[in-house]
Amino acid sequence: MVQASLFKFIIGKSIRIISLLAALCLLSFVLVSHSPVDPVQAYVGADMAKVSPEQRAKIAEHWGLDKSPAERFVLWGKSLLQGDMGTSMIYRAPVTDVIKERFQASLALMGIAWALSGILGFLMGIAAAMLRGSWLDKLIKWYCLTLASTPTFWLGLLLLIIFSVWLGWFPVGMGVPAGVLKENVTLANRINHIILPALTLSIIGVANIALHTRQKLIDVLESDYILFARAKGEAGLKLLWRHGLRNIALPAITLQFASLSELFGGSVLAEQVFSYPGLGQATVQAGLRGDLPLLLGLVLFSAIFVFTGNLIADIIYKLVDPRIKEGNAI
Amino acid sequence: MSEISAVTRDSRNSKFFKFIPGLNRRQRTLLMIASSVLVLAAVIMASLLLDNEKIATHFDEKNLGPSLEHFFGTDWLGRDMFTRTVKGLSLSIYIGLIASAVSVVIALVLGMSAATMGKTVDRVITWIVDLFLGMPHLVALILIAFTLGGGAKGVIIGVAFTHWTSLTRVIRAEVLQLRSAEFVQISRHMGKSRWWTAFHHILPHLVPQFFVGFVLLFPHAILHEASITFLGFGLSPHKPAIGVILSEAMKYLSTGMWWLAFFPGLSLLIIVRAFDIIGENLRLLIDPHHAHD
Amino acid sequence: MLKVNNLSISFIQYQAGLKQRNLQVISNLSIKIDAGEILAVVGSSGSGKSLLAHAILGILPKNAMVSGSMLYKGAELTPEIQKKLRGADITLIPQSVNFLDPLMKIGEQVRCSAGSGNPREKQKSIFRRYSLDEKAENQYPFQLSGGMARRALVASAVVGGARLIIADEPTPGLHPQIVRETLGHLRELADDGCAVMLITHDIGTALSVADNIAVFYSGTTVEIAPTADFKGSGEALRHPYTRALWNALPQNEFQPVEGFQPSHSGHLKEGCLFEPRCSQSSQECKCSTPEIREIRKGKVRCHNAT
């Protein structure tokens, strides 16, 4: 029964997500094809002057730019359904390959930041709520509210100034040292380059989860069942462990999964500041240089990324919360 | 018990002014709002008063650190960073104003329609909200800015058309709740028309929510404007914008000119925080029981 | 076993616009309960009776201000002592199933409250005592029937072996059979030598089980009377409000009490709080607050009582 209802739920959600993705494809295609940015120039790059009108026309034909937008959309949509997102103009490689490679780099970065900010934020929220009104609570709240107003890229710049320029502990940019072949990049190299951007994203990322957990725990601590537990002599950390965590962990995990959208946005900025070769940097490049297939692919991919996070959050709720899980079973 | 705890829940906000004895919470909250408004007004005034001559090129004064003459130092062209920052901030506030205004109007129209015009409309609007929430904000901004070929227009339209979603949800929920409230039901039963009820009973309750929502959109709008400009999709490099200043500063980081990035970013943070403080404290004044503390 | 003298509780409240005001919820309340006795505290809903329970247990919100004295077995109830006594000596039977942790299985919740000794054995024996299925051990609160949940509440409250039991509105809107069962549990506990304080808005419920009735009006007790005094048309009762409550019962004259109870907003007025609704009010009632005094084995707060 549980499985059947969960299955039904996932199917329903998936249909909704697919409808949203389809609409997103159309919307972003329409937007992109109205841009004044010339895709041919994107392909040719800086030496536009050296290209004759005939060559231009040839390039346009090659990319199908001579066709009407509607025709192009149908063509694009058809190949999209076959898993082909086209070819990136600036990287001269299939969009799927570019995204795959970039996503691996971004996944490491976002994964670290996601886990770190989740755990730290959760603990900070608990500490603040347990010691509500104390100086620690005020400090945590002040920190979170201030960080929520801090531009991610500025924080990244500050970290760069302090750790790379002044202290010289980390390189100023690039995911791997320049001039080193891909095969020779060591794990240490990678770690060295990922620390600062991951730190930037984590420092900002704790704010949301900490404030949310704090509020949730305060609500729980004011709830009837905590009152009853206290009336029966439970107190302190034991009370928190028995009744508190159980009731705040689930919302916190859900929130963390649902916040992938902000994480992605943050990583775009962090990657730009630290020249980290991930999805975010590719998005910026695709936008700035008019790489239409790549930009469309990335918009679509980021949406899938966000929807997946939301879907996981929903499924966790269904699977873990006994009120929903066993409620269905009866 | 619950009714007591709800009433007496001590929302310990605006503790900033606690060190001034003899102020109660109401006065502290009002003081927080007033001082934040003052900061914002000062920035706008200063940007009008400061001479454009200061951000012209002065090669004899280039690369100077912060001093009494140049609070925020000067850049490699000898431009006064303080003047650039202040002008950039006021530009940010203007853009935030336009973008937030458009956003709240969209949110009001869609939120009200979703809650009052029947199931189908509600479904469609919820679906559109989901659609816009599907893309990360920044990606959506890049896409819109790209479509419009960058510039101030791209930024304003981009920010305005990506920030209405959460407020739409709030307004929709609020209207749905009001609609089922007793006094609205009674008004309908007494034969008042739908529009009369909406105008006389629902709208007045929405106005405070709406206003707080408007103020609280500013921080997001300003931060996103700066971000998108920083990435190179927004305001043109000739404009004194914080995003432009910071992206230029990035090129000069390794020279050790830390003030190029430090002060403008910090000022942006303060402005964003000021809007946040105004919004949160207004909410506290309007609805002390439900505001987060 | 428990003696409360001149207890007052107040709060600071914020209204729209953050205007501050002081909220006096309980003023000069005095009661006393002995072992083996059930004292019912009767007052209308929302009059702050629950806060009396929370004050005795020491679980009031932090912003509450408390004055007066509370003695348990002759010793002053300080916050430290309250902390030690909660669960082990004093416990609470709350009013609804919402007081059970929604995400914890019943058996575990009962074991959490078992205090010293072997929790599992204690839980098994209390389950038997309140005829709870073994199946309930592994169920969540939302899966229990109303009667079961009620028994689980009582079980988890008394499993620690408390001697003073405060039942806060334990029977609101329940099926008559469950009401009878719950009240039966309270009687059993009292007969075992516990002191039971039953807080309720329903004078009928109170009369069916309590030994003494304390009538609560606008944050204080206006009368404490033996249950036996509630008879006829209330001649034996001492306070006009008590008499009016008694006569308002359907099986009596079914006469509603006129007027409203003053809410505990701002400053309470001078004089007797019941004066505006009282048919026997005099000039004295208007200006001076009556002290509580002993009349015919009961206590009353009225200038005119004889």
Image (tube, rainbow, N blue to C red):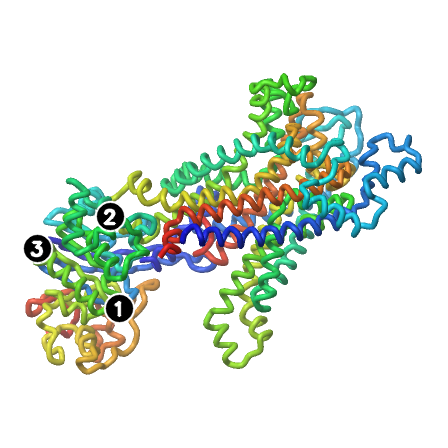
Q: Earlier in the sequence, mark 1 or mark 3?
A: 1
Residue marked by disc 1: C44
Residue B265 seen in this snapshot: no
Foreground mark, 1 or 3, reads: 3
Q: Is residue A199 above or below residue C141?
A: above
In the foreground, C131 or B110 = C131
Give, as a three-letter code, the residue at label 1: Ser
Tell me where residue C253 appears, x and y as whole percent: 19, 83
Q: Are both tags, 3 and 2, on one chain?
A: yes
In front of the other: label 3 or label 2?
A: 2
Pointer 3 residue: C192
Is residue C65 left or right of C32 when viewed as pictured?
Answer: right
Identify the secondary structure beneath mark 3.
Answer: loop
Distance between the alpha carbons at the discs numbered 1 and 3: 30 Å
Residue flagged by tag 2: what amino acid is it? Gly
Amino acid, disc 3: Asp
Give SS at disc 1: loop
Front residue (pair C242, A225) = A225
Q: Residues within 10 Å of mark 1 (few under 14, many from 20)?
A: some
For label 2, count other residues whose C-alpha is less than 10 Å away and answer few (under 14), some (14-19) or many (20+).
many
As displayed, is residue C147 above or below residue A87? below
Q: Position of residue A161 (x, y in %)?
A: 62, 24
Find out whether the residues at labels 1 and 3 contact each other: C-beta distance under 8 Å. Answer: no
- Asked if badge 2 and badge 1 are on a common chain, one would say yes
Query: Going by the image, does B81 lie left or right of C55?
Result: right
Residue C118 visible in image: yes
| Residue found at x 14% / y 69% | C208
Q: Which mark is residue C107?
A: 2
Q: Residues within 10 Å of mark 3 (few under 14, many from 20)?
A: few
Observer-nearest of C40 and A94: A94
